[in-house]
Image (spheres, rainbow, N blue to C red):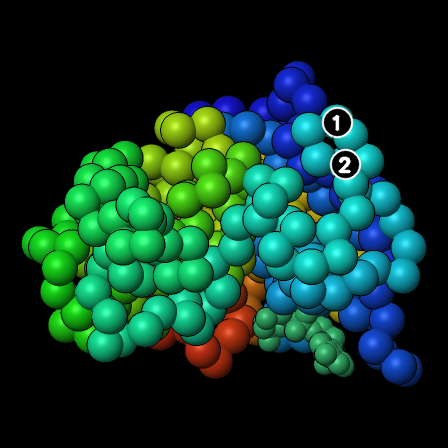
Amino acid sequence: MTATLSPATTAVLSLTGVSKRFGAVQALKDIDFDVHAGEVVALVGDNGAGKSTLVKTIAGVYTPDGGTMLFDGKEASVSSPAEAQHLGIATVFQDLALCDNLDVVANLFLGRELYTGRALDEVTMEQESWRLLRQLSAKIPSVRIPVASLSGGQRQTVAIARSLLGAPKVVMLDEPTAALGVAQTAEVLNLVERLRENGLGVILISHNMSDVMAVADRVSVLRLGRNNGTFAVSQTTSQEIIAAITGATTNAVSKRAARRESTDGDTAPAAQAPDTRSDASASTQEEQS
Ligand SMILES: Nc1ncnc2c1ncn2[C@@H]1O[C@H](COP(=O)(O)OP(=O)(O)OP(=O)(O)O)[C@@H](O)[C@H]1O
Ligand SMILES: [Mg+2]
């Protein structure tokens, strides 16, 4: 794991002083954020902390009011998702945006179909699909079945594979395990590790502390639209992260996490973030680990 707080290499993506306001709401204020090649950075924070706004700003959905963004060391301004993709920033949004009635190949190449002459080049697209899925060590039985018949984890896999088509350097995943059970969550976390092994910078939004502690190298906390700490996972506890998320060390959530950590000994703690959307998988996983 590359778990130092500031890795020596140049960040593949680096934001400085990024702000974004929606009318009266200051959604982001002076945000500094970076991710390196071969690194997983978890972006955490309570509801409304600004996580999605930050991701959408990086993805070119929103234009920031101020601040700079460096990509590969060069200043970049992205004014559309297509531009971000072209630059090498891929995003898997929470809704995945898959077409249920189409098969895996058609979903992977949706809008970017390959042709031989005027006919679709099905053979090359299918080969390329398998190549992408192998790269992720993904367990998909067939690429010629409709996406509707796949499990939640497999659908997430297809969405992640699709994001890799343009050979990006940074992949952002918005809550990739939120709707998944224990086994499927583990599968998706494996995919995240594959992405890191392939040298990508991965930005992982998650409300699930056990997922974060399991795969992230660093954790960046947003609170009320501002930076509220960056932690190397190897040198922190979920209690410390929760304290940064909630802005206090003495609230009910962090006290509960502290109690659990002291009874668990010094094994990797797995408390849940203070979020009603978190499901039971966090505690179930903890019991299994
Ligand atoms: N398009 C928008 N127009 C107006 N306000 C917005 C818009 N998008 C986000 N906001 C506001 O900006 C703040 C940050 O929202 P954001 O969605 O980034 O939070 P989040 O950290 O992703 O929260 P959650 O965990 O609930 O997804 C919130 O106060 C939200 O209401
Ligand atoms: Mg959000």
What's the residue at 24%, 70% (across, down)?
102
Check disc 2: other Cα within 10 Å, few if <14, some if 14-19, many if 20+: some
Q: In the rendered view, does 52 fall on the left or right side of 178?
A: right
Question: In the displayed structure, would residue 167 be above or below residue 189?
Answer: above
Q: Which residue is mark 2?
A: 70
Q: Which residue is mark 1?
A: 73
Question: In the displayed structure, would residue 166 be above or below residue 187?
Answer: above
Pinpoint residue 192: horizontal percent, then vertical percent: 38, 43
- Residue situated in front as seen by the camera: 276 or 184: 184
Q: Quadrant of ligand 1?
A: bottom right
- Residue situated in front as seen by the camera: 269 or 165: 165
- The local secondary structure at tag 2 comes to strand
What's the residue at 12%, 65% (across, down)?
145
Question: In the displayed structure, would residue 72 be above or below residue 202?
Answer: above
What's the residue at 68%, 64% (across, down)?
61
Circles 1 and 2: CB distance less than 8 Å? yes
Q: Is mark 1 within 8 Å of ligand 1?
A: no
Instruction: Give the residue type that dot 1 points to.
Output: Gly
Check disc 1: other Cα within 10 Å, few if <14, some if 14-19, many if 20+: few
Residue that sits furthest to the left in the current view: 141
Residue that sits furthest to the front in the current view: 117
- The local secondary structure at tag 1 comes to loop
Asked if one can make out residue 4 in the rendered structure from this viewpoint, the answer is yes
Instruction: Give the residue type that dot 2 points to.
Output: Leu
Where residue 286 sits, quadrant-wise, is bottom left
